[in-house]
Image: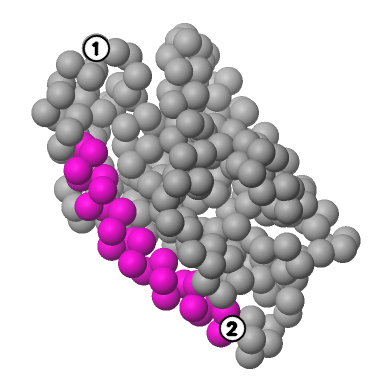
Amino acid sequence: MHIEPGVVDGAKLLLGTATGVASVGIVAKLAVDHVKQNGNLLALTGRSAAASAMVLGFFEFLPHPPVGVSEVHLILGTTLFLILGAVPTAIGLIFGLVAQSFLFSPTDIPQLGMNLTTLILPVLAMAALAQRIIPADTPYIEVTYGQAAKLSAVFQGGIVAWVAFWVFYGQGFTAETFANAGAFASVYIIVVLLEPIVDLGALALAKTFRRFEKTGLPHGRLYQPA
């Protein structure tokens, strides 16, 4: 989901900066609201730190082959969401992506706003979908493959849609851009099928090691109904 250098350049980069700042601002507002409602800044900080470390690890250590105009990453956004919650996941994506850009891939810095937008907004869309398809009396450890697949489809589909937008915005509607965007989207279908399996494996471990709940690290909805 990294937008490669040169795909969008010049003054067009300003739109990515604007959407990136707006996306981070939305997450900041949600974080403030979360603390006001739950009154537990320490728990939010711990979950966000865990998410940030895992996101950075996913970026650096999991395979991320270049396909078309971007790279295909197994970010495991739905797994993080189900275990840690929406706000910590979004914060983790922000800090993980910023750290990855500044520490390991400085060439990604000009595209940082676009990359932040590409990840954050799909997480928020996935969280909204979860409220609709997962009953309030169902803890996340009881999520089915079908439900996880729908969440993954929204998250990964959102990433593909934003990557396509940046490509067409930067390079125009040409046969080459259509081919590159299509190649990228086709590979992400594999991710959509694979990610729910990882989700269910992580949830099965959480169910087996129920004492994990006592650490305070997982989101309350993991083990308890809403």
User: What is the quadrant of residue 157 in the picture?
Assistant: bottom left
Q: CA distance from mark 2 to mark 1?
A: 50 Å
Which residue lies under the disc numbered 1? 214
Q: Which residues are magenta?
A: 178-203
Q: Is residue 172 above or below residue 170?
A: below
Magenta residue check for 209? no
136 on left or right of 51:
left
Q: Nearer the viewer, residue 138 or 116?
A: 116
- Give the residue drawn at x 56%, y 37%: 96
Question: For the view shown, which residue lies furthest in the right direction?
Answer: 11
Here the colouring is one colour
Residue position marked by numbered label 2 in the rendering: 178
Quadrant including the N terminus? bottom right
Above or below, 218 relative to 153: above
Across and down, in percent, residue 2 comes to: 60, 57
User: Amino acid under label 2?
Assistant: Phe
Q: Position of residue 44 (x, y in %)?
A: 47, 19
